[in-house]
C-alpha cells in the first residue's frame, strides 16, 4: 500500500477557481485585480483550499471574457503588473497553497501581435501561424460552423482570404501543425513555469486540431436546428438526437487524434520541472493517455451535466467514469465553473437549496478524486439574470437572444431572459464580501463590471456568514477540514454499498485501517437507512439535528448527509 506522502499534492488538494475580474477589487475601479486577490489570501487559507486555479489574467480585449489572449507573457493592466503577479504567487506559496494558471492553446485574440502580423499579408512570416484558406466561388472554404455562432470562417478583406475560428471570430485558431507555433506557445508555458507556477488548466484542448482535409458537413445543417434540439453535449439526459446532430456538425473540428501527441510533448515540457500539473478542460478519458504520459487530470463533467444530482445519476456516473480510467489515472470532479450555472442554482429545487448545497459539497469532497470549487459557491451565491441587454458582457447571451427569437419566435423581452439564462454572465457576477453597497466588492460609488447580485443584502455574503455557525461558509470550512484530516477521503479506496434504496447513496472510503462510511439522502423525503457497517463516530453531518451514533438504522432528513467512521 502507498504511503500518503507517495501521492502527489494535486491528488490530495482541493482546488478553488478564481475568476479574477469578479473576485476582489483592490484598487476600487469595479474590476477584480491582483491587489484584491493578495488581500484575500488569508481568507482562502482559512477556508481551507489547497490550490488556486486562476482564470485568464493575461492582457485581453475581453471579447470572450479573457479567453481571448493578446499576450501570453504578461498581466492584463486592469489586474495589475507582472510584479504584482509575482507577489501573489509568492504569497500563495508562503501560505502553503499552489497556483495553477489557465492556458489557452487553441486560439489567440485577433489583437494578438501574431495575428496582426499574420493577417497583414499573404507572405508575412507569421501567415501560417493561423489557419487561412481561400474561399470557393465567393463562399467560405467549407460549411463548418463556429461553436459560438455563425460560420467557422471569417473573411478578411486585406488579403481576400478566410481564417478559421472555432469560437468567436475575435478568437482565430492557431495552426498547431506549424512547429513555430508550438515553439512559441511552449515558450509561454515555460515562462510561467520558470516563475514558479504549479501547472495549468488547459482550455478547450479538444479543439486544437481539425480534420486537415476540411471535409464539408452534410448540407442543410444549421445552428437553429441544433438549438432546437437542446444544447448540452454529453449530458446523459440529453436527447440522443442532439448528441448525434452535434457530432455530425462539429465532429471534424474536435478531438482529432493528433492532439494526443501534442499533449505528450507538453507533458514532457512540464515534467522538466518538479511536481507540476496539467488539467484538461475535457471529459474525454483519452487525454489521460496511458495514465502517466498526457494530462494529470481531466474533469468528470458528466457528473454535473444532469438536471438533478440523484443517487442514481451519481452511481451511474461513478461506475462509468472510474471503470474507464487507465490504471494510474486520477479522477477529478467538479459541480460548477465560470461556464455553467452556479451549483446552488443548478441543483437547488427552490425549497431545500441550503440543505442540497451542503449535501452536494459533501458528495464532491468525499467522492474519489480531486475536487474543484468555483469562487462564491462557499457562500451559496446564485445565478443572477441580467435583464438588460446593454449590460451583457458575454456575447453568447446575445447569440442566444437571437436564436431564441428566430427558432422559437419568442418576443424580445422574453428572449433576453433566455439569453441571460443561457449566457455566462449570470454565474460570473462579483464576489459578495459583505452587506455593504456592491456587496463590498468595490466602493459604493463605483459601477462594477457586472452587476452585483442584490442577494448580498440577504445574507449571501462572507462577512455575515462567518459569524453564523450554521452558515454555508462554515459548513464549507468544516467539510474541507474533515477532508484534509482524513486520508481515507483524500486517497482511500472507493466502494459503493448497495443498501437497497434508490434515493440513498452510500459508499465507503478506506485507507490503511481506517474506513469511513458516507451516507447521502439525495431525496426530498425522510429515508431510513440500515447502516451496513458498525460505526463509532460521526465526522460531519450536513444538518443540525444530529443522528445518534448508537442508532443502527437512522432516519435521514431530506438532503441530509453524514460521514461516519466505521469501527
Ligand atoms: C472554454 C472556457 O472555459 C470558456 O469560458 C471559453 O469561452 C472557451 N473555452 C473558449 O476559450
Image (cartoon, rainbow, N blue to C red):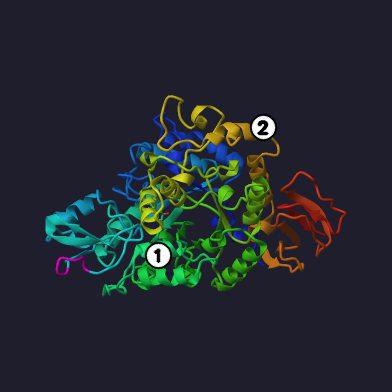
Q: Residue at x 32, y 49 (%)?
A: 69
Task: State the mark number for residue 467.
Answer: 2
Task: Indicate the quadrant of ligand 1 in the picture.
Answer: bottom left
Instruction: Name the element at disc 2.
Output: loop
Q: Is residue 155 left or right of residue 104?
A: left
**Distance from the alpha carbon under mark 2 to that under mark 1:** 48 Å
Q: Earlier in the sequence, mark 2 or mark 1?
A: 1
| Residue 394 position in % (x across, y down) | 38, 47
Please tell me whether residue 139 belongs to the stretch shown in magenta.
Answer: yes
Q: Which residues are magenta?
A: 136-141
In the image, residue 501 lies at what x, y percent? 75, 66
Q: Residue at x 59, y 60 (%)?
A: 369
Asked if disc 1 is less than 8 Å from ligand 1, the answer is: no
Residue at x 28% of width, y 75% of height? 215
Query: Neighbour class for label 1 at 10 Å: few (<14), some, many (≥20)?
Result: some
Residue placed most toward the observer, 478 or 29: 29
Residue 477 located within the stretch drawn in magenta: no
Provide the residue designation for mark 1.
226
Tell me the quarter of the picture where residue 381 sits.
top right
Query: Looking at the rendering, in which quadrant would you find the C terminus?
Result: bottom right
Pinpoint residue 495: horizontal percent, then vertical percent. 69, 67
Instruction: Please rate how many residues cluster around mark 2, counting C-alpha atoms within 10 Å: few if below 14, some from 14 to 19, many from 20.
Output: few
User: Of helix, strand and loop, which mostly describes the magenta segment?
Assistant: loop
Amino acid at each position: 500500500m502507498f504511503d500518503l506522502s507517495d501521492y502527489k499534492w494535486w491528488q490530495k488538494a482541493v482546488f478553488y477557481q478564481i475568476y479574477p475580474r469578479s473576485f476582489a477589487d483592490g484598487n476600487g475601479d469595479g474590476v477584480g485585480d491582483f491587489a484584491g486577490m493578495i488581500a484575500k489570501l488569508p481568507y482562502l487559507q482559512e477556508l481551507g483550499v489547497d490550490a488556486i486555479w486562476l482564470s485568464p489574467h493575461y492582457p485581453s480585449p475581453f471579447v470572450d471574457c479573457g479567453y481571448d489572449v493578446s499576450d501570453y507573457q504578461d498581466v492584463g493592466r486592469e489586474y495589475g503588473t507582472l510584479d504584482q503577479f509575482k507577489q501573489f504567487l509568492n504569497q500563495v506559496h508562503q501560505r502553503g497553497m499552489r497556483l495553477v494558471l489557465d492556458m489557452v492553446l487553441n486560439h489567440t485574440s485577433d489583437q494578438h501581435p501574431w495575428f496582426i502580423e499574420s493577417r497583414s499579408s499573404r507572405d508575412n512570416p507569421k501567415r501560417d501561424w493561423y489557419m487561412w484558406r481561400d474561399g470557393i466561388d465567393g463562399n467560405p472554404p467549407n460549411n463548418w460552423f463556429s461553436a459560438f455562432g455563425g460560420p467557422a470562417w471569417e473573411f478578411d478583406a486585406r488579403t481576400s482570404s478566410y481564417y478559421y475560428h472555432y469560437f468567436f471570430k475575435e478568437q482565430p485558431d492557431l495552426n498547431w501543425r506549424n512547429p513555430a507555433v508550438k515553439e512559441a506557445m511552449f515558450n509561454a508555458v515555460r515562462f510561467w513555469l520558470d516563475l514558479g507556477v504549479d501547472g495549468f488548466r488547459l482550455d478547450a484542448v479538444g479543439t486544437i486540431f481539425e480534420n486537415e482535409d476540411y471535409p464539408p458537413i452534410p448540407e442543410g445543417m444549421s445552428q437553429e436546428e441544433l438549438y432546437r434540439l437542446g444544447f448540452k453535449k454529453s449530458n446523459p439526459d440529453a436527447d440522443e438526437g442532439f448528441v448525434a446532430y452535434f457530432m455530425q456538425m462539429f465532429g471534424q473540428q474536435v478531438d482529432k487524434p493528433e492532439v494526443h501527441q501534442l499533449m505528450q510533448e507538453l507533458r514532457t515540457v512540464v515534467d522538466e520541472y518538479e511536481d507540476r500539473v496539467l488539467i484538461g478542460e475535457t471529459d474525454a478519458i483519452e487525454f489521460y493517455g496511458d495514465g502517466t504520459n498526457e494530462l494529470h487530470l481531466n474533469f468528470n463533467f458528466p457528473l454535473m451535466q444532469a438536471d438533478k444530482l440523484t443517487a442514481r445519476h451519481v452511481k451511474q456516473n461513478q461506475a462509468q467514469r472510474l471503470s474507464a480510467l487507465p490504471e494510474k489515472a486520477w479522477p477529478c470532479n467538479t459541480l460548477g465553473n465560470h461556464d455553467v450555472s452556479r451549483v446552488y442554482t443548478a441543483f437547488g429545487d427552490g425549497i431545500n437549496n441550503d440543505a442540497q448545497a451542503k449535501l452536494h459539497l459533501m458528495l464532491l469532497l468525499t467522492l474519489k478524486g480531486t475536487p474543484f470549487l468555483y469562487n462564491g459557491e462557499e457562500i451559496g451565491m446564485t445565478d443572477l439574470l441580467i435583464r438588460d441587454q446593454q449590460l451583457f458582457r458575454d456575447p453568447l447571451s446575445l447569440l442566444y437572444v437571437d436564436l431564441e427569437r428566430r427558432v422559437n419566435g419568442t418576443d424580445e423581452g422574453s428572449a433576453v431572459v433566455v439569453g441571460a439564462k443561457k449566457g455566462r454572465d449570470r454565474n460570473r457576477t462579483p464576489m459578495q464580501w459583505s452587506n455593504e453597497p456592491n456587496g463590498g466588492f468595490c466602493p459604493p460609488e463605483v459601477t462594477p463590471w457586472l452587476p452585483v447580485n442584490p442577494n448580498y443584502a440577504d445574507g449571501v455574503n462572507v462577512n455575515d456568514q462567518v459569524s453564523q455557525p450554521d452558515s454555508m461558509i462554515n459548513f464549507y470550512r468544516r467539510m474541507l477540514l474533515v477532508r484534509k484530516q482524513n486520508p481515507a477521503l483524500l486517497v482511500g479506496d472507493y466502494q459503493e454499498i448497495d443498501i437497497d434504496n434508490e434515493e440513498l447513496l452510500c459508499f465507503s472510503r478506506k485507507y490503511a485501517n481506517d474506513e469511513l462510511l458516507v451516507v447521502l439522502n439525495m431525496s426530498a423525503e425522510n429515508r431510513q437507512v440500515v447502516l451496513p457497517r458498525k460505526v463509532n463516530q460521526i465526522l460531519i453531518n450536513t444538518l443540525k439535528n444530529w443522528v445518534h451514533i448508537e442508532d443502527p438504522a437512522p432516519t435521514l432528513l431530506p438532503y441530509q448527509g453524514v460521514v461516519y467512521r466505521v469501527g
